[in-house]
Image (cartoon, rainbow, N blue to C red):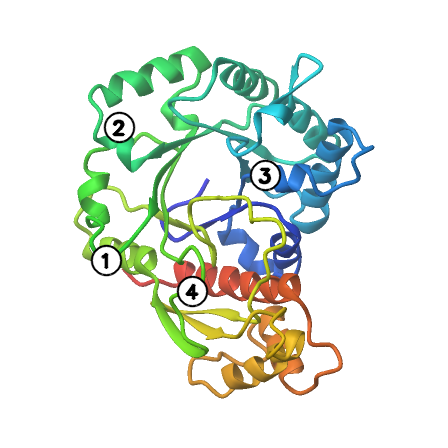
Amino acid sequence: MFDHIHYVPILRWKLAERGALANLQHPICDVITPLIEPTGWVFGDTEKRKTLESKIAKIAEDIFQHWGEDPFFMDFWLVPPSARIHRGDSSFLLMAREARTHNLNLIPVIGLKREPKYQSAVNEIIAADRFGLCLRIFSKDLEETGLPEKMDRLLTELQVQPSNVDLILDVQCVGEATPNYSTMILKIPYLDRWRTFTIAGGSFPKDLQGFKPGKGIQPRWEWRKWKECVEAHGIARLPAFSDYTIQYPLFEEPPKGAAPSASIRYTYYDDWVVIKGLSIRRDDAAGNQQWPANAEILCKQNEFMGATFSKGDKYINDTSKQTAHPGNATSWLRAGFNHHILHTGTNCAFLKV
């Protein structure tokens, strides 16, 4: 399916993420396979009168509209228990059925410790669609005894061979002290047999409280460690790159009534540039009008890649020149997601090894 010069962005399928995918220039999509993991937020953002079936149908329609028929991974592990089973049926099965109506190439994701009904649903999906399977393991799985036996048992139960499995090693939170990727990869069984192999992680902070107003820099540790691993050529099989884009790796539902700051998250090679604003609800701040001013600051930085680089960059540049439409938290996240996915996909595709 793909080799190490490929990008797997992990997306929770909120409005900003959906829009970011839709605004990608099409050639870059050939080196991108998103991993979509819907959350309770996604299932709860429609009117209460709508049924679970209609919400799942909406997700499938959105994927078709914003991504199309190219392959994507889907993991239902963040779906709340109340939405996992509906009228005795798995919501993941409902999702797969809706995907077929749109000719979507959905590859289901499973882990080593999913509940029996989840595994049963995945079994039925891969038997019906024959697109194969994505196995997502975590760095803590590497430290447990009997990993090869656990993998063998799961794949036997699902009746699938490693050659039809896309393996993702998800490190989740990555920092400077995280062991180098090559060390972890050497612990993976059957490394040369998986259909594809990807390593995922994220280092964007949980919130922006650690940044002062103005420009700040946050290292992209997951990118730095992946690039070091690939350029060193010290392992038999090089991994593709995956990250949590411009979000914190460990998902938490945002608190009710949270007031975001008027900030901009911007990806630039080994780092993120953060233009930090104040809360949009502070009486002594300028509310949404802070965004055009912060966009103007970003556009003057050496890291800004120009209005023609992506739709997100065009939005940043255009908004920096006017205040009539300053945008909101969703539109600025969409711009950040769009820039990040294009920037990262491009750099994965052209990394020289």
Mark 3 or mark 1, earlier in chain: 3
Q: Identity of the amino acid at label 3?
A: Pro
Q: Say which mark, if any, is on residue 190.
A: 2
Residue extending furthest front? 283
Q: Nearer the viewer, mark 4 or mark 2?
A: 4
Q: Quadrant of residue 220?
A: bottom left
Element type where label 3 sits in the image: loop
Residue 145: percent from the left, percent from the top? 20, 21
The correct choice, above or below, for 310 with respect to 182 in the image is below
Mark 4 or mark 2, earlier in chain: 2
Element type where label 1 sits in the image: loop
Report the Cα–Cα distance between label 1 and label 2: 28 Å
* Residue pointed to by mark 3: 38
Residue 191 visible here:
no
Q: Identity of the amino acid at label 1?
A: Glu
Q: Nearer the viewer, mark 3 or mark 4?
A: 4
Q: Say which mark, if any, is on residue 209.
A: 4
Report the Cα–Cα distance between label 4 and label 2: 42 Å
Mark 3 or mark 4, earlier in chain: 3
